[in-house]
Image (cartoon, rainbow, N blue to C red):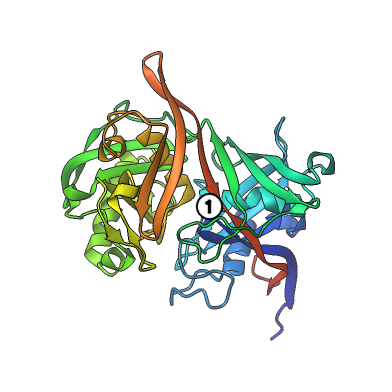
Amino acid sequence: MSFKPQIRIPATYMRGGTSKGVFFRLDDLPAAAQVPGKARDNLLLRVIGSPDPYGKQIDGMGGASSSTSKTVILSKSSQPGHDVDYLFGQVAIDRAFVDWSGNCGNLSAAVGAFAIHAGLVDAGRIPENGLCTVRIWQANIQKSIIAHVPITGGEVQETGDFELDGVTFPAAELQLEFLDPADGEGALFPTGKLVDELEVPGVGTFQATLINAGIPTIFVNAADLGYSGSELQDDINNDAEALARFERIRAHGAVKMGLIKDLAEAESRQHTPKVAFVAPPKDYQASSGSAVKAADIDLLVRALSMGKLHHAMMGTAAVAIGTAAAIPGTLVNLAAGGTEREAVRFGHPSGTLRVGAAAEFKDGSWTVTKAIMSRSARILMEGWVRIPGDSF
């Protein structure tokens, strides 16, 4: 029996915020994978090492968590006024499935830097020193992101003293602006309400803020689910019953948001929506062992991604948090004290994060023009990934 040899594909392994992913230029992919479809999905699954019934992704680039099972494809932008088109694929770990339904806010921080490294930004727009503004078209949700990338000596500045909770080492600070962050799938509040009554059989009926901003997100009060809001990963991820309850909440919330027509569709849409629970500020110990003081934060937020409690906070969920916090009457705003605000600092399992948003009430509804936060990113490895030639 003969087997096809491995092929190699130019790729870059990058950290963006608290996530890692494999980045590709669209033109570097094999021709069959340059267009959406089965070949592209199969290629990315093999690169990451999925599906893996052991849940470890040993035979691929994935890191066996939702934060590290990610892929990015970039190309020169087809949109006027933009530099690069950014497509994000969330790769399932134990299933043969790539979810294209949403963005990754953390890896968004790496897109601008990669675009410059990869020659996708016109050289005339890159200063010798200062900030390079990279205009990103987020193709999954049809939205614009502006990345302000530090440049030193004509090259991307990756080292620095900016510290991001959830990331071990400091790096250069990158500021991201998510323009018109209401998710591309519908209204900012798809039910027309700031707070809904969400009925979930087997769990209960409780208040929820359902919002499309950054990524579709279901916010609930921690106390309504028997939590304090200061939980760490092991408190949730080692509790199979708790994870099943959160998945039921996610599925019923997705139906109420109009993202799916029936509960069965939730199985093939794992990346969105997210579920997060909020609480007023309190002292707690972060996963690093450092103390987070109630006086230093506005509220507590814990969020689940791909069926597990996230170790820090997804960047897109942070956009949803900042947006909801800016709108009086949402559960997020109420947990933060119920006052008008343009920025919020929240506590998550790894520490704290600050995010700002500009909201206004106009013509009988709320709109948000942009959300802003800082992240960092750097290249971890570059070269080629190799996969068997018959993988796709």
Outermost bottom residue? 1
Q: Is residue 94 above or below residue 193?
A: below
Q: Is residue 360 above or below residue 99?
A: above
Q: Nearer the viewer, residue 264 or 72?
A: 72
Horizontal side of residue 199 vs 53, given as left or right: left
Q: Nearer the viewer, residue 165 or 45?
A: 165
The residue that label 1 is drawn on is 106
Horizontal side of residue 101 vs 159, given as left or right: left
Given the image, on which type of amino acid does mark 1 rest?
A: Asn
Q: Residue at x 39, y 46 (%)?
A: 273
Q: Is residue 258 above or below residue 228?
A: above
Horizontal side of residue 372 vs 4, given as left or right: left
* Label 1: element kind: helix
Q: Nearer the viewer, residue 172 or 29?
A: 172
Residue 210: image x %, image y %? Answer: 33, 37
Looking at the rendered image, the quarter that the N terminus falls into is bottom right
Total number of numbered discs in the rendering: 1
Q: Residue at x 34, y 28 (%)?
A: 340
Q: Residues within 10 Å of mark 1 (few under 14, many from 20)?
A: many
Looking at the rendered image, the quarter that the C terminus falls into is bottom right
